[in-house]
Amino acid sequence: MNASAGPATSRADKAQANRRRMRAAALALFTDRGYASTSIQAIADEAGMAVQTLYFTFGTKSALLKEILDIAVAGDEEPVPTLERPKVRAAIADPDPVLQLRELARLSREIYERVAPVLQVVAGAASADSDLAELWETNNTQRAIVMTELITALASRSPLRDGVDTATAIDIALALQSPEMYHFLISRRGWSPSRWEQWTADALITQLLPSR
């Protein structure tokens, strides 16, 4: 039994390594040339793989980009939804609203440091590609679901700033931590991710919680 398991495991490891190589090649080309200007053949050539292998593995270029995005958001290849991940569950359960919002900003920074280049590829191509337009909207929807869970948990344990209800608090949190805001401050204004995290945490606390 062990003898047969060895080759099977080796083949699976090789297939996974090839998958990672194709994803890395695709992301490098997407960010350098743009999504529309990058062909499946170019990705295969960059990865040193046969184009048929790439088609067999991912099916379409948009499916390849979706996998790149999903893994960048998660930070690993485990199929665990964001809301079920331990760090997110811990942030939701934190009884201190200030610490909860600071942790929210820290988690957002961690994700954006991985995912920002991918999101720029998706956003840049969404207007001309219906598959990527759908992917962009799905990503926005998923981000809203996570933010709703986090801010609803906060509002259930702590009073919000006067005049701010839960729905408004969710909107403010989404706006402050939007990919557009991150891209503007990091890429256009030259902020560091740590400065963005600090500013975002301070803004969330000021905008959502009563003055102390």
Image (cartoon, helix red, strand yellow):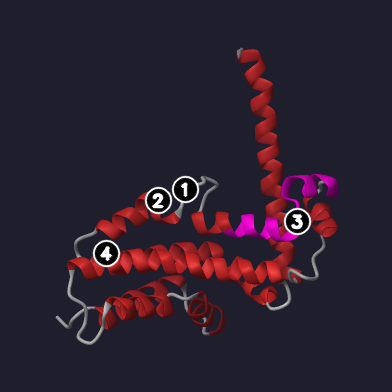
Q: Which residue is mark 2?
A: 85
Question: Are dots 3 and 4 in contact, CB under 8 Å?
Answer: no
Q: Quadrant of the N terminus?
A: top right
Q: Earlier in the sequence, mark 2 or mark 3?
A: 3
| Camera-nearest residue between 179 and 194 | 179
Residues rendered magenta in the picture:
51-69
Question: Are dots 2 and 1 in contact, CB under 8 Å?
Answer: yes
User: In this rendering, would 178 be left or right of 48?
Assistant: left
Q: Earlier in the sequence, mark 4 or mark 2?
A: 2
Q: Earlier in the sequence, mark 1 or mark 3?
A: 3
Q: Which residue is mark 4?
A: 153
**SS class, disc 2:** loop
User: In this rendering, would 91 be left or right of 1?
Assistant: left
Q: CA distance from mark 1 to mark 4?
A: 21 Å
Q: Earlier in the sequence, mark 2 or mark 1?
A: 1
Q: Which residue is mark 1?
A: 80
Q: Name which quarter of the figure residue 153 lies in.
A: bottom left
Amino acid type of the residue that numbered disc 2 sits on in the rendered structure: Arg
Which-is-in-front pick, marks 2 and 3?
3
**SS class, disc 4:** helix
Q: CA distance from mark 2 to mark 1?
A: 7 Å
| Camera-nearest residue between 155 and 74 | 155
- Whether 35 is drawn above or below 209: the answer is above
Amino acid type of the residue that numbered disc 4 sits on in the rendered structure: Ala
Specify the principal SS of the magenta part: helix
- Whether 210 is drawn above or below 85: the answer is below
**SS class, disc 3:** loop
Q: Which residue is mark 3?
A: 60
Location of residue 51 in the rendering, given as x and y in whole percent from the top left corner:
84, 49
